[in-house]
Image (spheres, rainbow, N blue to C red):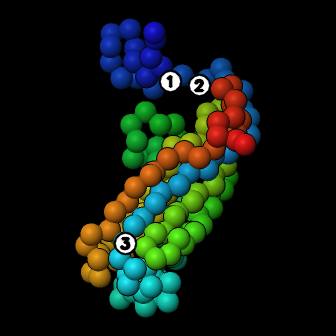
Amino acid sequence: MSMSHINEQGEASMVDIGGKNVTKRTAKAQAVVKMLPAALGLVLSDNMPKGDVFAAARLAGIMAAKKTFELIPLCHNIPVDFVEISFKVEEPDTLVILSHAGCEYKTGIEMEAMTAVFAAALTVYDMCKAVDKGIIITDVRLLEKRGGKSGPFGVL
């Protein structure tokens, strides 16, 4: 089995996408943040001491998606067309962070979508840690991808 990111000498290398076609690509990802019900209550009422948790996490997710190539070795610098960050509350103690990202390029945007939710989740932790140091970030995963040679993933 050949590996796309390993050269003939067994060294890490970037995949050559020069010959690939530009196609529309989208991806959705999620991260789950568990915290004390009292902490989630402060988030929902916008009474967390550090400020608006949703605004900070949304901005962090968008910024991280745009910088994924700087954070993850061998990721291509792709033209990100859009990144959306949304939140779903599952009371009493769970915040689900969702991302939806898209581009028109030669390679996918899955890593950007996943980086976005992870950065947003870390921002939630940072904004809330004074109230709850036991916050758990879990279930960071790709939910869906569309476009590209390998076809759809997770699409119902």
**From mark 2 to mark 1, how far is it between C-alphas?**
6 Å
Pointers 2 and 1 in contact (CB under 8 A)? yes
Q: Quadrant of the N terminus?
A: top left
Under mark 1, the amino acid is: Val
Q: Is residue 62 left or right of residue 104?
A: left
Camera sees residue 4 = yes
Q: Which mark is residue 91?
A: none
Q: Is residue 86 left or right of residue 124?
A: right
Q: Return the residue nearer the eye: 111 or 29.
A: 29
Residue 74: x %, y % from top left: 43, 33
Give the answer, above or below, for where 19 lies relative to 38: above
Residue 87: x %, y % from top left: 57, 69
Give the answer, above or below, for where 132 lies relative to 64: below
Q: Which mark is residue 35?
A: 3
Give the answer, above or below, for where 137 lies relative to 73: below
Residue 53: x %, y % from top left: 46, 78
Seen from this angle, which residue lies furthest front? 92
Q: Is residue 138 left or right of residue 130?
A: right
Circle nearer the N terminus (3, 1): 1
Under mark 3, the amino acid is: Met
